[in-house]
Amino acid sequence: MKTIIATVCNTKGGVGKTTLTANIAGVLSEIGEKVLLVDADNQPSLSSYYEIDSAGHSQGLTELVQAENPENLVLEELSHPLATYPNIRVIVSNDDKGHIKNWIMERPYALLSFRDNLRKAKHDFDIILIDTHGGSDHLQNAAVLAADFLISPVIPDLASAREFGRGTMDMIKSLEYLKPIAPLGPINIVINGVDNTNDAKTYVKLITDETFTNSFGSARVIKPMLSKIVAYKEATTQSISAHEMNNRTKSEMIRVVSDLFPHLADKALSILKEPEYVH
Ligand SMILES: Nc1ncnc2c1ncn2[C@@H]1O[C@H](COP(=O)(O)OP(=O)(O)OP(=O)(O)O)[C@@H](O)[C@H]1O
Ligand SMILES: [Mg+2]
């Protein structure tokens, strides 16, 4: 099967992009998928989310995006293995000065180099997940163009719903002129951080209402949602995938993954049904 490339994006900061990226990878890895994480944020949170084995080389995102002969790239060589999840490797963000976005801006066709290089490089990954930063610039645009589909976490509150409508959708619309050569994939909204407050209930209702998504063309809100619970934060601190924290995070993350990757739903849901304790 063809490798699937998904980019996690939302121009609003702090909505859970990196957390969601890492946790999707955790579930995919458990069901045997070979996953490549690409950290396209120059504040490299995803690069250090899980414990990586960084011995040996210092290559990363810069070499991926700027490669002139991508046919000679081998993504396994460009990426780092994780110490804890053998099915996941990471291309780290080695761009602390933010040079890549300028490099792209200065070159007419470089907006597509992220996409082209990922597709032309040799590798054995089933799924590639790209994490982006909160904001809009040429690197984030290139990461969006690289994807088969987009995953956008949105928090159910006023600021987040507004910013999705303005910032994220405006950014996506601004790339539509490239449709003939790099068609934009559909946008899957994942409501992240649901709690019991009336405010959250109001905004879940608003975001899931058809009139909200209809105004955004190809966007859809996936049914499974993620609760606002401390276990997601604790998983980050412990550098483990959230689905390993408790039954709730396991159930939520597996349902999100099953929805986003329907060809893997049976496999993913089967680990949900596994008994918690084997006597
Ligand atoms: N469902 C959740 N419940 C509780 N806390 C969460 C949840 N999702 C994310 N968080 C926490 O929210 C904070 C922001 O998450 P994260 O860093 O993933 O956001 P981001 O969108 O990647 O931010 P940035 O735009 O800065 O890259 C983190 O402390 C994370 O642990
Ligand atoms: Mg982040």
Image (cartoon, rainbow, N blue to C red):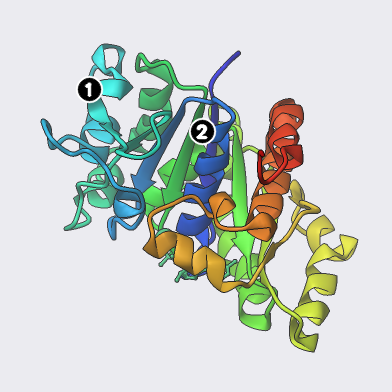
Dot placed on the residue nearer the N-terminal end, 2 or 1: 2
Quarter of image, res 254: top right
User: Which residue lies most toward the bottom here?
Assistant: 198
Mark 1 = which residue? 68
Crowding around mark 2 (Cα neighbors within 10 Å: few <14, some 14 to 19, many 20+) is some
Crowding around mark 1 (Cα neighbors within 10 Å: few <14, some 14 to 19, many 20+) is few
Secondary structure state at the residue bearing disc 1 = loop
User: Which residue lies most toward the right here?
Assistant: 210
Are the residues flagged by discs 2 and 1 in contact, CB closer than 8 Å? no
Q: Going 22% across and 56% down the picture, which residue do you hit? A: 98
Residue 138 lies, in percent from the top left, at 37, 50
The residues tagged by marks 2 and 1 sit, at their Cα atoms, a distance apart of 31 Å
Q: Judge whether 209 appears above or below 159 on screen.
A: above
Q: Quadrant of the N terminus?
A: top right
Q: Quadrant of the C terminus?
A: top right
Residue 98 seen by the camera: yes
Residue 272 lies, in percent from the top left, at 72, 41
Q: Is residue 120 left or right of residue 211?
A: left
Q: Amino acid at mark 1?
A: Glu
Q: Nearer the viewer, residue 253 or 167?
A: 253
Mark 2 = which residue? 29
Q: Going 55% across and 73% down the picture, which residue do you hit? A: 230
Q: Judge whether 27 appears above or below 230 on screen.
A: above
Q: Judge whether 109 appears above or below 22 on screen.
A: above
Q: Going 83% across and 63% down the picture, which residue do you hit? A: 208
Q: Nearer the viewer, residue 47 or 5?
A: 47
Q: Is residue 8 left or right of residue 195?
A: left
Secondary structure state at the residue bearing disc 2 = helix
Q: Nearer the viewer, residue 98 or 105?
A: 98
Q: Amino acid at mark 2?
A: Ser
Q: Is residue 73 left or right of residue 131?
A: left
